Amino acid sequence: MVDLFNAPLESTSLASCMNLKATRVFLLVGIAAWQSSCNSGPQQDCTRKIKEEIQPGLPLEIAEANLKKCGFKTTVDRAKNTLYGDKVVEGNPVSERSQVTINLDSDKKVAAVKVTTGLIGP
């Protein structure tokens, strides 16, 4: 018969050591996840401010240059007098997609700006 009151203390110190190691692993995984979620710096900020930068009356060329500077891929539809911008900020596992639609007047100047942002994921 095993006497639990007189059992050696080594088993509890081994369990304590394993708990400490598990705690460290979870802490490191948490820090890595937090760091990876904070890597979407200045380009994401410029997406939020793009509507302030591209105001009505701005020429098409300058509006398109501002979108490209912010990381957008641009397309001009001359038949519809519209400039489109599309940008995807890759994330793990969710990415953020931003789209800009700029309506132009007959002088090829900005008439209206619409910005939409959404998430893409599994």
Image (cartoon, rainbow, N blue to C red):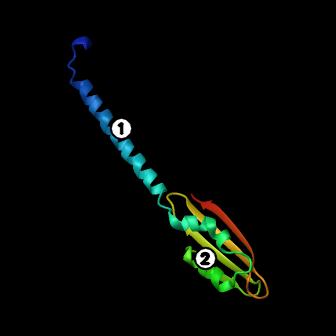
Alpha carbons under labels 1 and 2: distance apart:
45 Å
Q: Residue at left 31%, top 35%?
A: 20
Q: Position of residue 114 (x, y in %)?
A: 72, 70
Q: In the figure, is residue 98 to the left or right of 108? A: left
Task: Name the residue located 45 percent from the left edge and 51 percent from the top edge.
Answer: 34
Question: What residue is shown at x 52% (from left), y 66% (from top)?
Answer: 42
Q: Secondary structure at mark 1?
A: helix
Where residue 41 appears, x then y in whole percent? Answer: 50, 63
Give the quadrant of the C terminus.
bottom right
Q: Nearer the viewer, mark 1 or mark 2?
A: 2
Residue 78 horizontal/vertical position (percent): 73, 87
Left or right? Give the position of 58 relative to 46.
right
Picture layout, residue 42 above or below residue 15: below
Q: Which mark is residue 67?
A: 2
**Residue 61: % across, % down:** 64, 86
- Front-most of residues 71 and 59: 59
Quarter-of-image position of residue 52: bottom right
In this view, 112 is above or below 91: below
Q: Which corner quadrant of the image does residue 24 belong to?
A: top left
Q: Are marks 1 and 2 in contact (CB under 8 Å)?
A: no
Q: Quadrant of residue 109?
A: bottom right
Left or right placement of residue 71 versus residue 25 in this view: right
Among numbered discs 1 and 2, the one appearing first in the sequence? 1
Q: Which mark is residue 23?
A: 1
